[in-house]
Image: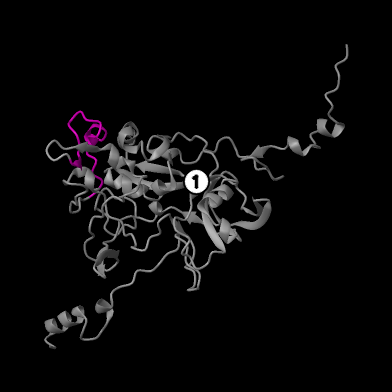
Amino acid sequence: MFKSRDGRSFRDVLGGCSNLSDTPKWGGSAASGKLVIVPDRLSAFNDLVGLAVVGRSVDLETLVDLDKLLRIAKVPFSKIQYLGGLSTIISFSDGDSMEGFLKARVIWGPWFSKLEGWKGQSLPLERVAWLNLHGIPLHLLDKEVLALVGELYGKVLHIPKAFEDNRDLSVVSVGVLVGEAGRIGESVSLTWKGRSFRLWVEEEMEAWVPDCLNGDYVVASDSEPDSPLKSSPVGIVEVDGIHRAGSLGGEEESPGLDDSNSHAYVGNLVEESGNDGGAGLSKGGPNSPCNLDNYFPGGASVGPAPAAAALGPSPNPFSVGRGVKTCRRADKVKMGSRLRKARSQQSKVSSPLDIRPLKRPRSERSPRMGGPICQRLWLTEGLI
């Protein structure tokens, strides 16, 4: 009894492919005709097995402030590396610190939707794409419309909170988490009350990295003062009565935790006081899940402790991190950094991702007699 043919042609039997649907697909789109065969013996980053964890942040704000959150929680990490999308890999100096952090779910639970040890596993392709939406009609320029357009390409991560006051309303930028490798650039139609409006969706070409990579890595010892991994001192410049960080030297004041709903870590560690009913941060007793000594027996400190700053009604070890301070610029962007030059001064209002330089008060940079610094210098030298 003869078997029936499976419908393949002679070319298909010899290895050809006559149907485009037979080509493999990655990330939902057809792969290109180029194929690279990787040798089975290759396996990168094996030295981090047992010393690093890979995690996916719950949102973009948590990803941007991840380094600050780790230092505030006094997690003894070594460095943070960005993997694309909302994923990062956090390295530790020893396996005990890594295991202690994995067990401290009460700490990292509000920050990561998924966290596991690095074992050489495959990670999905994800990246953060910033889409410029050109030509949305003014009467349809609403946050809900921006979200609907962004959802065509992936999960919407960021929508401008207040763009109604922008001078240029012809383009609005939206952050989207996409799973495609190709750049986005196409026309989209909006239908409203039987009418159709066309707009252009174009992805920005500049590479984007989160702010958690801008700071220097934590250094456990001070044996190498000239190491490029060690942070330099950051000065505090008073501009119009507001203290801002600058690079003028001196000691850095400890900033408090950003009052953002993404920082749920603070809420999980709040305990009500017995006297006034107010809330304060508490480290907890010896057996408390909030006690970091249960997870890091060797101590959770990752560097010299700065001056303590209160976060809440009473000062507490959880109120401020003790890690090595990073040389952060005061003009850091809110939702991340982009590796590009600043835009020229135009009539357009800069997006919330643009970098604005820190200005020093005229009294500190003016050589006239009115400046307090010049007067002190001249008094010291006996010129006045």
Is residue 266 visible in the rendered structure shown here?
A: yes
Q: Which residue is mark 1?
A: 85
Q: Position of residue 63 (x, y in %)?
A: 41, 47
Q: Residue furthest right?
A: 1
The quadrant of the image that shows the C terminus is bottom left
172 or 292: which is nearer to us?
172
48 or 198: which is nearer to us?
198
Report the side of 59 relative to 16 (left or right).
Answer: left
Residue 139 falls inside the magenta stretch = no
Callout 1: 10 Å neighbours few (<14), some, many (20+)? many
Report the side of 251 relative to 159 (left or right).
Answer: left
Main SS, magenta region, reads: loop
**Residue depicted at x 21% and y 81%:** 371
Above or below residue 244? Residue 32 is above
6 or 313: which is nearer to us?
313
Q: Position of residue 61 (x, y in %)?
A: 40, 49
Q: How many marks?
A: 1
Q: Helix, strand or loop at disc 1?
A: loop
What segment carries the magenta color? Answer: 278-303
Where on the picture, by quarter, is residue 109? top left
Where on the picture, by quarter, is residue 57? top left
**How is the structure coloured here?**
one colour
Identify which amino acid the numbered label 1 is placed on.
Gly
Q: Residue furthest front?
A: 193
Above or below residue 32? Residue 243 is below
Q: Residue furthest bottom?
A: 383
183 or 262: which is nearer to us?
262
Report the side of 367 relative to 89 (left or right).
Answer: left
Above or below residue 127? Residue 272 is above
Q: Position of residue 188 (x, y in %)?
A: 65, 53
Residue 300 falls inside the magenta stretch = yes
Is residue 298 visible in the rendered structure shown here?
A: no
